[in-house]
Image (tube, grey):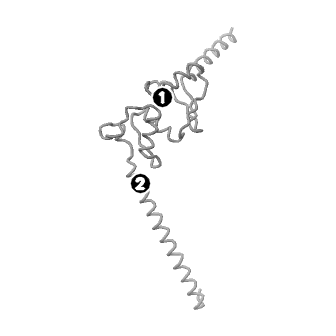
Amino acid sequence: MFISQLSDSAKKMTSENTETEQKTVRFNVGGQFYEVSKALIEQHEDSMLARLVSDTWLSNPDITIFIDRDGERFKNVLDYMRYGKVSLPITVSRETFLLDMEYYGFTSVDTNNSHSTPELSQIDDSESNKEVILRCVNIFQTKNLALAAMKKSKEKLEESKKKTGTR
């Protein structure tokens, strides 16, 4: 009797786990693997992802869907889907992000007037990204120049000591 109850409990848990597993969709985007809740995808029913998932997922929910795009940038698309806005890392330009959004079927993103669309007002402007990069390069160059000057000064001092015979 106890074994029978245990077996029934195990079957129920396995059934619940299977249902939970089927509530996610697996993507291979440019070699990067993502597992995303199906509910998140369904919230954006007009997107290419929703159409792709509904057709593929219904026929075989265990399949990993391959998308031939940049896998690193896909996480920005997922953030947009989750939060309705995104802060781009310095390595991703606004233009590239908007191209990805267009590819994935997000037509509500207004590329001409970022101030009227709240989700775009959160995106780092590529010009400010360039300014930050230039500032970092300038700091690096200044540091390298200072190190080179210090090295040259040290060499001259050692050379001078050798000539005078002091240590």
118 and 51: which is toward the camera: 51
Measured from the top left, where is residue 38 in percent x and y?
51, 25
Q: Please, which residue is most extreme toward the left here?
A: 116
Of the residues tagged 2 and 1, which is closer to the observer?
1
Question: At x 56% / y 36%, what residue is drawn?
Answer: 68
Q: Is residue 161 left or right of residue 118?
A: right
Q: Please, which residue is most extreme toward the bottom here?
A: 164
Q: Is residue 120 left or right of residue 33?
A: left
Task: State the image quarter where residue 64 is shown.
Answer: top right
Measured from the top left, where is residue 141 in percent x and y?
47, 66
Quick one: quadrant of the N terminus? top right
In the rendered image of this protein, does residue 145 appear above or below residue 60? below
Residue designated by label 2: 130
Residue 48 image label:
1
Q: Amino acid at mark 2?
A: Lys
Question: At x 61% / y 14%, what residue is drawn?
Answer: 12
Q: Residues within 10 Å of mark 1 (few under 14, many from 20)?
A: some
Q: Are marks 2 and 1 in contact (CB under 8 Å)?
A: no
Q: Amino acid at mark 1?
A: Met
Q: Is residue 155 left or right of residue 105?
A: right
15 and 129: which is toward the camera: 129
Task: State the image quarter where residue 119 is shown.
Answer: top left
